[in-house]
């Protein structure tokens, strides 16, 4: 069986969970499995047919999957007889994000095998808190080497793998992601409010005098929304508010209004999230 782990990660949490899943699969089923892992930013959908089972991960933004993840899903070909696990990282609550993304995936005919959301530090809040705050200290001191909820979830995998080996199909496990009534009733209101807020947040991005014009932000923005123009860093209108540029800028020069000045920056659960080097590495792996 060939397994593909795909993820989008703005600030490192989802990338870390994708690694955690890969490590688990390697240590538990090493002899039988091939497990490849790519960011959706560097993966070509033309290569997807060679895989039997796909894990697709993303951060929750406003009780939903990010816009670029929906765009990626829309490019997928027919994936009949293949299975998919959806996973997400979130600060507090995922709402109907899985149900909504699954609705977009339906036309591919892929079989949904399960979906799980893992609580991680909210990287939106972190960028607006002082390094000394309780929430930041808690995020830094948490032990990320054991994620019990995920370990528990993995207990279902052997049965899924065995059935696939026998029947070359995931059909007997097909289930829809859950749909929560509270999100169905009020989620649209929340998303609408967030859309308004997002519009205003996007306009408040600016760069302070510490900027060295290294252009790391230009290269790392997942939607190419940042440019160096007339010797100044400028922001376009396509921002998905992933906050990668804020957290990754080496001189902490990118700000949202006044709320992020002198505040904490997050580099992933292990402090080793470098989206660009991951992109390059994975590109090499796919050649
Ligand atoms: C713009 C934005 C919106 C967010 N909205 C939600 C939300 O609705 N619910 C939630 O639980 N967490 C929310 N979060 C927190 C992220 O889902 C969480 O920090 C996630 O782990 C970030 O993953 P990443 O580091 O892979 O980008 C939001 C974060 C951002 C930046
Ligand atoms: S990453 Fe930071 S220092 Fe580098 S160009 Fe962007 S804003 Fe300036
Ligand atoms: S401008 Fe910054 S926050 Fe917006 S999409 Fe690009 S990297 Fe993410």
Image (spheres, helix red, strand yellow):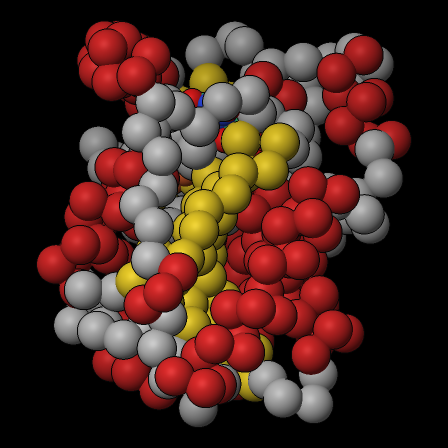
Q: Can residue 132 be seen in this view?
A: yes
The residue that appears at 87% across and 31% down in the rendered structure is 141
Residue 53 lies in quadrant: bottom left
User: How far from the left and from the top, in percent, is residue 213?
Assistant: 50, 45
Closer to the camera in the image, 22 or 160: 160
Q: Residue furthest left?
A: 107
User: How far from the left and from the top, in percent, is residue 76?
Assistant: 20, 66
Q: Is residue 248 visible?
A: no
Closer to the camera in the image, 30 or 268: 30
User: How far from the left and from the top, in percent, is residue 59?
Assistant: 47, 39
The residue that appears at 44% across and 28% down in the rendered structure is 94
Q: In this view, does 201 lie above or below 115?
A: above
The residue that appears at 62% across and 31% down in the rendered structure is 119
Horizontal side of 105 relative to 66 (left or right) equals: left
Q: In which quarter of the image is ligand 3?
A: top left
User: How far from the left and from the top, in percent, is residue 7?
Assistant: 46, 56
Placement of the C terminus among the 4 image quadrants: bottom left
Closer to the camera in the image, 68 or 258: 68
Closer to the camera in the image, 278 or 39: 39
Q: What count of labels does the image hold?
A: 0
The residue that appears at 23% across and 72% down in the rendered structure is 79
Q: Is residue 124 above or below residue 98?
A: above
């Amino acid at each position: 069986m060939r397994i593909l782990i795909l993820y989008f990660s703005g600030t490192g949490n989802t990338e870390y969970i994708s690694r955690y899943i890969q490590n688990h699969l390697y240590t538990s089923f090493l002899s039988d499995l091939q497990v490849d892992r790519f960011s959706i930013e560097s993966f070509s959908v033309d290569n997807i047919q060679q895989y039997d089972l796909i894990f697709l991960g993303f951060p929750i933004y406003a009780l939903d999957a990010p816009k670029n993840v929906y765009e990626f899903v829309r490019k997928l070909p027919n994936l009949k007889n293949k299975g998919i696990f959806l996973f997400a990282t979130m600060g507090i609550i995922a709402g109907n994000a899985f149900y909504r993304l699954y609705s977009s995936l339906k036309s591919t005919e892929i079989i949904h095998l399960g979906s799980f959301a893992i609580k991680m530090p909210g990287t939106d809040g972190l960028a607006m808190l002082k390094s000394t705050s309780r929430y930041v200290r808690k995020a830094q001191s948490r032990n990320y080497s054991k994620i019990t909820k995920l370990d528990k979830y993995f207990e279902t995998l052997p049965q899924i793998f065995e059935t696939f080996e026998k029947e070359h199909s995931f059909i007997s496990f097909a289930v829809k992601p859950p749909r929560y009534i509270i999100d169905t009733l009020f989620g649209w209101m929340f998303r609408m409010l967030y859309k308004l807020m997002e519009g205003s947040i996007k306009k408040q991005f600016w760069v302070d005098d510490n900027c060295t014009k290294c252009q790391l932000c230009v290269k790392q923005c997942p939607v190419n929304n940042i440019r160096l123009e007339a010797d100044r860093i400028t922001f376009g209108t396509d921002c998905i508010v992933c906050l990668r540029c804020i957290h990754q800028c080496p001189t902490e020069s990118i700000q949202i209004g006044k709320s992020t000045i002198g505040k904490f920056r997050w580099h992933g659960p292990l402090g080793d999230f470098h989206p660009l080097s991951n992109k390059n590495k994975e590109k090499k792996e796919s050649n």
